[in-house]
Image (cartoon, rainbow, N blue to C red):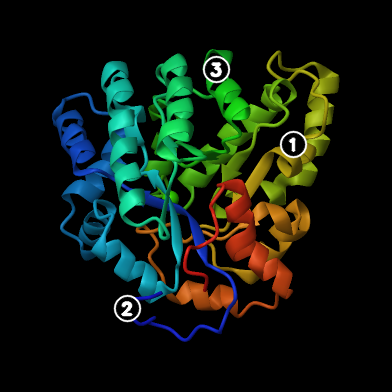
Amino acid sequence: MSTYPSLIHLPQRSYRRIATEEAFSPPEMLDIYNKILAKGDVDVGFKHLMGFYMSSPSERAQHIMRCLVDLDDLRLQHMDEAGVDVQVIGLTSPGVQIMDKDTAVSFAPVANDILAAAMRRHPDRLVGMIAVAPQDPAAAAKEIQRGVNQLNMHSVVINSHTQGEYLSDTKFWPIFEAAEAMDTPIYLHPNAMPASMIQHFIEAGLDGAIYGFGVETGLHALRLITSGVFDRFPKLQIILGHMGEALPFWAYRLDYMHAATVKSKRYPSIQPTKKKPSDYLRENFHITNSGVAWGAALKFTQDFMGPDRVLYAMDYPYQYAPEEVAILENLDMAPQVRKAFFQDNAERLFKIPPASNAI
Ligand code: CA
């Protein structure tokens, strides 16, 4: 099915490689971003993230911007060269979440329609996630329903906090109610840190994907657990990238200290939950390896989560690294686990139909 030859030698396979945390930006969104960046009081995290990528002359930044806006030939060429058959695509961070409420509510459907049109042009290659504006939870819930019913999308992307507000706040829970009812997992993707958190990371140059994103998104996921989101919405599924933002590695200490904190009644925000934090991680989360092509971490995460809850992702175009596909393929992994990792778990979670031209 590939138009372009793969850059690397990859073994014969009987499954599709589905990359599940891939990003795009409509040019129209970059126009809105330019207006936000031109204002005097622009959010410091946004300035460091998209402000950098949109203005830097560096080869890496320019490459990323070229790839982000393309949903056709360039993207398919890169997928073919890396041996990626299908991309599951979300609106790049911070999506509409940096916009004022009215702009965010009106632009999310525009972005979704652009992505849906690309899905129709490349039905075997591109799968879309529904972008929503948490600034208006009722509108976000409606957009989830529209995405499923009209756009053939079966997952949601939310780029972590929305201007310093977290989904653990009950005002956002209509979004979870809709996601649970429509059976759409929510990909909780990183965002630049809120202003109240970012300064100590910026001064060390550690605010971005190197570390800060994982810290902030991991915090967000834990806030969902400790606030009781999954007791209220037990079927809700959250997807975390970057090997679960390291939360599997934290699980033992989270369980121990959560129990201790509940018992001590030290914080009003830490109330008893029905289960342990690690139970929610294993029952209400899926994890992708985006940006982490490391066998030891992958094996640990598969052991902790179970192999049916760990999925492949590349993190295109921010980490377009075709050689990582070969690294992952060369790991010692049982054939059925490998197939689950690259294909089956994504097909099930994102409701991706079998390829029309079977590999
Ligand atoms: Ca990403």
Q: Which of labels 3 and 2 is toward the front?
A: 2
Residue at 51% from the left image edge and 83% from the top image edge: 10
- Quadrant housing residue 307: bottom right
Q: In this view, does 254 lie to the left or right of 127?
A: right
According to the image, label 2 marks what residue? 4
Q: What element carries label 2?
A: loop
Q: Residue 280 carries which label?
A: 1
Q: Can residue 246 be seen in this view?
A: no
Seen from the viewer's position, the closer of residues 247 and 130 is 130
- Crowding at mark 3 (Cα within 10 Å: few <14, some 14-19, many 20+): some
Please report whichever mark, 3 or 2, sits nearer to the chain's N-terminal start. 2
Number of labels in the image equals: 3
According to the image, label 3 marks what residue? 174
Seen from the viewer's position, the closer of residues 310 and 115 is 115
Question: At label 1, which amino acid type do we have?
Answer: Tyr
Residue at 52% from the left image edge and 78% from the top image edge: 326
Q: Is residue 322 left or right of residue 118?
A: right
Decide: is 209 above or below 48: below
Residue at 35% from the left image edge and 59% from the top image edge: 317
Please report whichever mark, 1 or 2, sits nearer to the chain's N-terminal start. 2
